[in-house]
Image (spheres, rainbow, N blue to C red):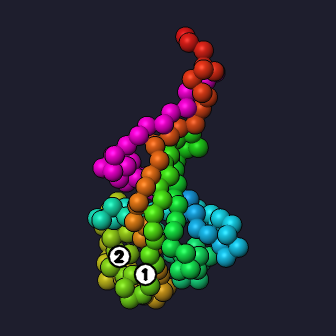
Amino acid sequence: MARQIATNTTVDRDELLDFLRSRRNGVLVTTRTDGCPQLSPVTYGVDGEGRVVISTYPERAKVRNLRRRPQASFVSLGDDFGDAWVQVDGTAEVLDVPESVEPLVEYYRAAAGKEHPDWDEYRQAMVDQGKSIVRITIERWGPVATGGFPARLVEED
Protein backbone atom coordinates (compact mmCIF):
# COMPACT_ATOMS: atom_id res chain seq x y z
CA MET A 1 0.00 0.00 0.00
CA ALA A 2 1.29 3.44 -0.92
CA ARG A 3 2.32 5.72 1.90
CA GLN A 4 0.34 8.92 2.29
CA ILE A 5 2.14 12.22 2.80
CA ALA A 6 1.01 14.13 5.90
CA THR A 7 -0.44 17.53 5.05
CA ASN A 8 -0.80 20.87 6.82
CA THR A 9 -2.91 23.43 4.99
CA THR A 10 -3.03 26.98 6.34
CA VAL A 11 -6.55 28.41 6.15
CA ASP A 12 -8.06 31.82 6.75
CA ARG A 13 -11.04 32.32 9.08
CA ASP A 14 -13.69 31.84 6.36
CA GLU A 15 -12.04 28.62 5.16
CA LEU A 16 -11.77 27.45 8.77
CA LEU A 17 -15.47 28.06 9.41
CA ASP A 18 -16.42 26.24 6.18
CA PHE A 19 -14.29 23.29 7.29
CA LEU A 20 -15.78 23.27 10.80
CA ARG A 21 -19.33 23.48 9.42
CA SER A 22 -18.70 20.41 7.26
CA ARG A 23 -18.20 18.20 10.32
CA ARG A 24 -20.06 17.24 13.49
CA ASN A 25 -17.64 15.32 15.72
CA GLY A 26 -14.88 16.66 17.87
CA VAL A 27 -13.00 16.57 21.13
CA LEU A 28 -13.24 19.43 23.63
CA VAL A 29 -10.22 19.96 25.87
CA THR A 30 -10.67 21.78 29.19
CA THR A 31 -8.49 21.99 32.28
CA ARG A 32 -9.09 20.06 35.51
CA THR A 33 -8.45 21.61 38.92
CA ASP A 34 -5.04 19.91 39.07
CA GLY A 35 -4.03 21.44 35.72
CA CYS A 36 -4.34 18.21 33.74
CA PRO A 37 -6.39 18.16 30.55
CA GLN A 38 -9.97 16.85 30.48
CA LEU A 39 -10.97 15.52 27.05
CA SER A 40 -14.64 15.18 26.10
CA PRO A 41 -15.85 13.69 22.81
CA VAL A 42 -18.74 15.88 21.59
CA THR A 43 -21.07 16.65 18.73
CA TYR A 44 -20.86 20.30 17.72
CA GLY A 45 -22.05 23.01 15.38
CA VAL A 46 -20.95 26.49 14.40
CA ASP A 47 -23.31 29.35 15.19
CA GLY A 48 -23.98 32.51 13.19
CA GLU A 49 -21.19 34.34 15.04
CA GLY A 50 -18.62 31.70 14.03
CA ARG A 51 -18.39 30.14 17.48
CA VAL A 52 -18.10 26.41 18.11
CA VAL A 53 -21.27 25.41 20.00
CA ILE A 54 -21.76 22.28 22.11
CA SER A 55 -24.91 21.12 23.87
CA THR A 56 -24.33 19.73 27.36
CA TYR A 57 -25.54 19.61 30.96
CA PRO A 58 -24.44 21.83 33.86
CA GLU A 59 -23.19 18.83 35.88
CA ARG A 60 -20.62 17.72 33.29
CA ALA A 61 -16.90 18.00 34.00
CA LYS A 62 -16.35 20.15 30.91
CA VAL A 63 -18.83 22.72 32.23
CA ARG A 64 -17.34 22.79 35.73
CA ASN A 65 -13.87 23.18 34.21
CA LEU A 66 -14.93 26.00 31.87
CA ARG A 67 -16.70 27.92 34.63
CA ARG A 68 -13.43 27.89 36.57
CA ARG A 69 -11.11 28.48 33.58
CA PRO A 70 -12.81 29.46 30.33
CA GLN A 71 -9.89 28.64 28.03
CA ALA A 72 -10.65 25.72 25.73
CA SER A 73 -9.11 23.82 22.87
CA PHE A 74 -11.19 21.89 20.40
CA VAL A 75 -10.30 19.39 17.68
CA SER A 76 -12.75 18.90 14.81
CA LEU A 77 -12.65 15.37 13.43
CA GLY A 78 -14.09 13.69 10.36
CA ASP A 79 -16.13 10.50 10.32
CA ASP A 80 -13.07 8.35 9.57
CA PHE A 81 -9.86 8.23 11.57
CA GLY A 82 -7.75 9.26 8.57
CA ASP A 83 -9.87 12.32 7.72
CA ALA A 84 -8.49 15.85 7.93
CA TRP A 85 -8.74 17.63 11.27
CA VAL A 86 -8.10 21.05 12.79
CA GLN A 87 -7.48 22.40 16.29
CA VAL A 88 -8.97 25.70 17.43
CA ASP A 89 -8.32 27.51 20.70
CA GLY A 90 -10.41 30.16 22.37
CA THR A 91 -12.46 31.43 25.25
CA ALA A 92 -15.62 29.58 26.21
CA GLU A 93 -18.80 30.70 27.86
CA VAL A 94 -21.48 28.50 29.36
CA LEU A 95 -25.16 29.46 29.19
CA ASP A 96 -27.80 27.73 31.29
CA VAL A 97 -31.60 27.67 31.09
CA PRO A 98 -33.35 29.99 30.37
CA GLU A 99 -30.57 31.89 28.50
CA SER A 100 -29.46 28.70 26.75
CA VAL A 101 -32.79 27.88 25.06
CA GLU A 102 -32.56 30.04 21.92
CA PRO A 103 -28.83 29.33 21.44
CA LEU A 104 -29.73 25.62 21.70
CA VAL A 105 -32.23 26.13 18.86
CA GLU A 106 -29.38 27.59 16.78
CA TYR A 107 -27.14 24.71 17.89
CA TYR A 108 -29.73 22.16 16.71
CA ARG A 109 -29.94 23.81 13.30
CA ALA A 110 -26.15 23.91 12.99
CA ALA A 111 -25.44 20.39 14.30
CA ALA A 112 -28.41 18.61 12.70
CA GLY A 113 -28.39 20.68 9.52
CA LYS A 114 -32.17 20.83 9.47
CA GLU A 115 -35.23 22.21 11.18
CA HIS A 116 -36.85 20.45 14.13
CA PRO A 117 -40.42 19.25 13.43
CA ASP A 118 -41.77 20.99 16.56
CA TRP A 119 -39.74 23.89 17.95
CA ASP A 120 -42.06 24.43 20.93
CA GLU A 121 -41.57 20.80 21.93
CA TYR A 122 -37.79 21.12 21.48
CA ARG A 123 -37.63 24.29 23.58
CA GLN A 124 -39.66 22.67 26.36
CA ALA A 125 -37.42 19.59 26.29
CA MET A 126 -34.35 21.82 26.70
CA VAL A 127 -35.95 23.50 29.73
CA ASP A 128 -37.13 20.18 31.20
CA GLN A 129 -33.65 18.68 30.81
CA GLY A 130 -31.93 21.81 32.14
CA LYS A 131 -29.60 21.88 29.13
CA SER A 132 -26.62 24.17 28.87
CA ILE A 133 -24.65 25.31 25.87
CA VAL A 134 -20.93 25.94 25.53
CA ARG A 135 -19.89 28.61 23.02
CA ILE A 136 -16.22 28.88 22.11
CA THR A 137 -15.05 32.13 20.56
CA ILE A 138 -12.20 31.08 18.27
CA GLU A 139 -9.06 33.10 18.90
CA ARG A 140 -6.48 31.01 17.04
CA TRP A 141 -6.29 27.87 14.97
CA GLY A 142 -3.79 25.57 13.40
CA PRO A 143 -3.63 24.27 9.88
CA VAL A 144 -6.10 21.73 8.54
CA ALA A 145 -4.04 18.58 8.78
CA THR A 146 -3.99 14.96 7.72
CA GLY A 147 -1.87 12.20 9.13
CA GLY A 148 0.75 10.30 7.22
CA PHE A 149 4.43 10.15 6.58
CA PRO A 150 6.91 12.98 6.08
CA ALA A 151 7.37 13.57 2.35
CA ARG A 152 11.01 12.38 2.59
CA LEU A 153 9.75 8.87 3.44
CA VAL A 154 7.28 8.55 0.61
CA GLU A 155 8.65 6.93 -2.53
CA GLU A 156 7.98 8.56 -5.86
CA ASP A 157 5.85 6.49 -8.25
- Locate residue 109 relative to residue 55 in the image: left or right: left
The label shown at residue 129 is: none
Q: In which quadrant of the rendered image does the C terminus lie?
A: top right
Residue 14: x percent and y percent? 30, 49
Mark found first going from the N terminus, 1 or 2: 1
The label shown at residue 103 is: 2
* Residue 33 seen from this side: yes
The image quarter containing residue 136 is bottom left
Residue 66: x percent and y percent? 54, 75
Say whether residue 106 is magenta. Answer: no
Residue 30: x percent and y percent? 58, 68
Question: What is the secondary structure assignment of the residue under circle 1?
Answer: strand
Nearer the viewer's eye, disc 1 or disc 2? 1
The label shown at residue 95 is: 1
Q: Which residues are magenta?
A: 1-26
Amino acid type for the residue under numbered disc 1: Leu
Q: Nearer the viewer, residue 35 or 21?
A: 35
Question: What is the secondary structure assignment of the residue under circle 2?
Answer: helix
Residue at 61% across, 23% down: 3
Amino acid type for the residue under numbered disc 2: Pro
Residue at 65% across, 72% down: 32
Residue at 31% across, 83% down: 120
- Locate residue 122 relative to residue 149 in the image: left or right: left
